[in-house]
Image (spheres, rainbow, N blue to C red):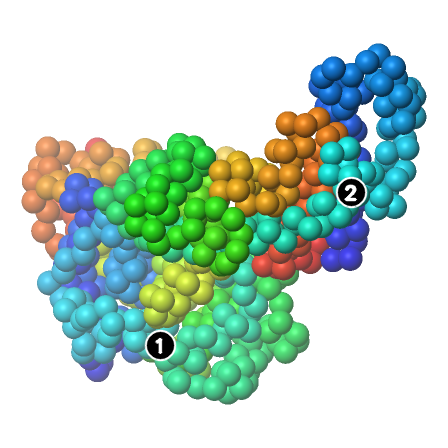
Amino acid sequence: MVRFILRRAALGLLVALTVMTLAFMLTRLSGDLAISIAGPGATQEDIEIIRKAYGLDQPLYIQFASWISRALVGDLGNSYFFKDSVSNLIAARMPITMTLGLVGLGLALLVSIPLGTLAAMREGTWVDRAVTVVTMIGQATPSFWFGLILMITFGLTLGWLPISGTGSWQHFVMPGIVLAMTATPALTRLTRSGMIEAIASDYIRTARAKGLTRRSIIFKHALRNAAIPVVSIAAVQLGFMLGGSIVVETVFALHGVGFLAWESIAKNDFPVVQAVVLVLATIYICLTMLSDILNALLDPRIRST
Amino acid sequence: MSAPLLEIEDLSVTFNERMAAVRNASFRIGRGETHCVVGESGCGKSVSALAVMNLLVSAAKRTAKRLSFAGEDLLAMPEKRMAQLRGNRMAMIFQEPMTSLNPAYTIGSQLTESYRRHKRASQRDATARAVKLMGRVGITAPEMRLGQFPHQLSGGLRQRVMIAMALMCEPELLIADEPTTALDVTVQAQILRLLNELKDEFGLSILLITHDLGVVARVADSVSVMYAGEVVEHTTARQLFADPQHPYTRGLLSCIPVPGKSQRDKPLGSIPGVVPQVSVGFSGCAFRSRCAFADADCAGTINTQTATADHNYLCRLTPTRQKELARA
């Protein structure tokens, strides 16, 4: 198990390095940073001063090396616009994004596991088909549009929920639902197919031959096996959701990391953009690792290798 | 003989109301008796067994004139009561020991759960019984095995676990569906010997499904030969080998090499063709497409014939007549 975790960690580190390289390259591709920082109306001299001040006059590989070496010790540089360290900016906003992501994932699991199980138990009936149709509609709905519809309905018309901000738990309900909707279809289908496979398996026939209750057969024997891929995909989905929260946070004006990323991209605040990409990628890598570990904990066949 | 433990009369199973998997099968199993159902793949052996346990898939429909277990009518029995019998008074083991155990739970947890459910026993009592039975079925270091997962065990061990699991609640009937087919020959022999011992020790009745007449010879008291969903011959094991009546049974027997009898330079017997899929409403003898003696009359209704008191078969022709035809 320890070797298993170490191997995954080494792999994760390589992925993180790749992501850092890509993030660095992409921000440099988006034009001359000195010009955009200086803003319109700046003289050639101003631009040169800025270029020197931010070290943008140095060769790319030196810029890259200095960013990497500082990032490795936790120094992500300073924002050009917020006049604060990038680490502080992200740390202040991370709780909001994390809360949103976990609420979204929780809701998604709460809906998709019962829905997928129900569809599998009624395979081929109208219940199953209805579940398929609903998940397909969910998959096809853009989250910003769904967010706005919710806002109009529950925020403005009914006045049940606040439409923007982060003051209370109610503020997270609608963004959480929107985020959950992005993950629910995949998790539902995965639960359904896993359950169908499990129900048709020999060990379920054995469980039935043992005279166990229907509840024990479905929930103890079948769901336990069907849940293995669902749990690992759920962890990965949380990573997607943190990325997807850029849209949701913007729509609901939640000042989380996603909102910060959106602002910084618009302003070419590349230390922040690089750092957000790095942090989200690192979280994503950790979640993938966590998913593998969870997978191993749930599946004894993987655990012992 | 006292009243039989399991009585099956005119059992039929259809799939999607089109395919007839079992057609008017009848046999009975006495207490402490081993009854073998033998036939090629797709003859309806497993389906018959699942029909007794009421474990058929939902596309299958079961009908019978009579289906009773220890005097109780299984046909009218509600599922809830049936679930109380399953794993308790009638247990089943399967052909695939590799996949029949749940990969996510330990051997101990899977062994004890039916005992805890049916006997309302504590985990400690159930574990003690599991350890005892594991030892009985020849599993070494049973305490250690309790915490292991199925994938850590060999096929032979898993089948022993399945047998121990089936015996947990001291069932009266054990249904074994090809229990040795997936195992090595040496393990196969051990398992069959074990089943024989357990039968005497626990007074078990065993319904054993196999395609292997060698297995029948080792364990069976009585035999049903099934073909295309029908029981074509029903008799004692001794009678079956001494005086087979049905051309299909004789064909099956001719496929087995007998030391000293079979000659090296002569081919072994074989039955050309495969078992046909029979649909609902099929009439006549299903074996006629592969039978050397078949003629136009075989498409008509075939009546059961009796050779001796406990030996009947489903063919128009007596063995004497078959021999005449073979010579001609």
Q: Is residue A229 left or right of residue B62?
A: right
- Tell me the amino acid under the disc marked 2: Asp
Secondary structure at numbered mark 1: loop
Residue wearing tag 1: B88
Residue sitting nearer the eye, B184 or B248: B184
User: Subunit of mark 2?
Assistant: A
Q: CA distance from mark 1 to mark 2?
A: 71 Å
Task: Give the class, few, some or many, for how many residues have Cα within 10 Å of label 2's Cα (few <14, many ≥20).
Answer: few
| Mark 1 burial class by Cα count in 10 Å: few <14, some 14-19, many 20+ | many
Residue located at (52% from left, 48% from top): A165
Query: Residue beneath label 2, please?
Result: A84
Residue B286, quarter of picture: top left
**How many discs appear?**
2
Residue occupying image coordinates x 34% and y 48%: A154
Residue A89, given in percent of the width and then of the height, sits at 72, 45
A264 left or right of B203 in image: right
